Amino acid sequence: MLKGIHPLLGPDLLHAIRTMGHGDDIVVADANFPSSSLGPKVIRADGVDAVAITEAILTHMPLDTFAPDAAWRMEVVGDPEAVPEICATFQDLVHRLAGDFTVRTVERFAFYAMARKAACIVATTELRLYGNIILKKGVVHPHEVFRA
């Protein structure tokens, strides 16, 4: 255990977000997502839901302010205007922890294509459908770094 580190960030996930660079993407995936077949490193978060692990990540990782978008969710198949409850929760979480960002909607197969290019995929045991989000890492500013 470390002071100041969200307790859901295990060593593999903490290492992943620490080594990601500005502009790298991380996927938080639900239990139905094809995490292991897309290519990027998969970090297991068994017993953890997608909202909780997204909160843990956003507690420490800024989103990209230089890109037009920095957060995406999967569009509901057959109903592109639908906003599942978990997706509304993702939006609230992003606003609360990262700032004035909109979680954009991406068609299912385009979402998979984006996930293939991610730095890693966090495979949760989230059972709510469409519990998937992609986050683009931003810049950590000098005043945000711990100084002894």
Image: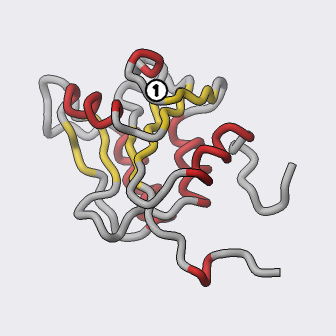
* Picture layout, residue 21 above or below residue 108: below
Towards the viewer: 148 or 129: 148
Which of the image's four quarters has the C terminus? bottom right
Name the foreground residue: 117 vs 59.
117
Q: Amino acid at mark 1?
A: Asp
- Image position, residue 125 (x, y; %): 56, 23
**Residue ID for mark 1:** 30
**Residue 80 x, y percent position in the rendering:** 14, 35
Residue 82 rendering spot, x and y as whole percentages: 20, 37
Residue shown at 47% from the left, 17% from the top? 36
The residue located at (26%, 58%) in the rendering is: 69
Which quadrant holds residue 107?
A: top left
Figure coloring: secondary structure
Can you say whether 115 is above or below 103 in the image? Answer: above
Where is residue 53, by image quadrant? top right
Kind of element beneath mark 1: loop
